[in-house]
Image: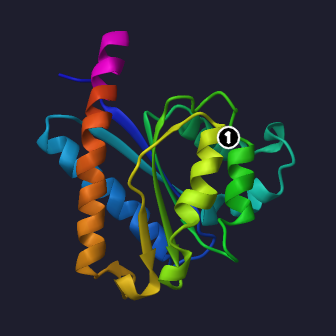
Amino acid sequence: MTAPLNVIAVAGSSYRPSRTLVLAEELLAQLAEQLGREGHTVNGQVIELGSIARAVGGALQRSELPAEIEAQVKAIESADLLIVASPVYRGSYPGLLKHLFDLVDMNALIDTPVLLAATGGSERHALVIDHQLRPLFSFFQSLTLPIGVYASEADFTNYQVSNELLKARIQLAVERAAPLFAARSATLQKIA
């Protein structure tokens, strides 16, 4: 029996309803299902930026965070795997999402696998994953997975993933990510 994997999905939208949240939840659910078929257990948690945005935005340094928000930052830092989904605002991820990661210890995410995702109004923003998000996690020395998932407004109906091509992209990202995550689970088991 392998140790459960702690998978944290960060949904970087400040609003509800949120296509970004839907995408993060879908990625987490599909990953848990894929790993479950392979005999692994996933302890999944979604951190919604919208629910902590005011506290995060009001903290100039980590010591100013309320205890419940500090616990969520620690969950990010101790994740075995991260899913980070961001909406695109003016060609990049939101400043509050960046500020949240400014509060994360710079050494906490070394070698942590990160599955990147983003949502935007149109396909023109799809490169935000490679040009904005990937460099952020390169700073943390994280292992960003080669396949990211981008979704536009047209890929959703009533805040549900409805586009078959997006569903296929999610499945492909999860299938390609699962072996890396399973290997990490085995490594964590050996350490424990």
The residue at 39%/82% (across/down) is 159
Q: Secondary structure at mark 1?
A: helix
Residue 169: x %, y % from top left: 29, 65
The image quadrant where one finds the C terminus is top left
Residue 1: x %, y % from top left: 17, 22
Q: Is residue 117 left or right of residue 187?
A: right
Residue under label 1: 70
The residue at 34%/79% (across/down) is 160
Count of marks placed on residues: 1
Magenta part mainly helix, strand or loop? helix
Q: Is residue 54 left or right of residue 47?
A: right
Is residue 192 something that shows in the picture? Answer: no
The residue at 63%/59% (across/down) is 132
Residue 148: x %, y % from top left: 42, 58
Along the viewing direction, whichever of 131 and 18 lies nearer the viewer: 131
Q: Say if 17 sits above or below 40 in the image.
A: below
Snapshot quadrant of residue 75? top right
Is residue 147 in the magenta section?
Answer: no
The residue at 27%/21% (across/down) is 186
Task: Report the amino acid beneath label 1.
Answer: Glu
Q: Write down the region rendered in magenta.
A: 185-192
- Label 1 crowd (10 A; few <14 / some 14-19 / many >=20): some
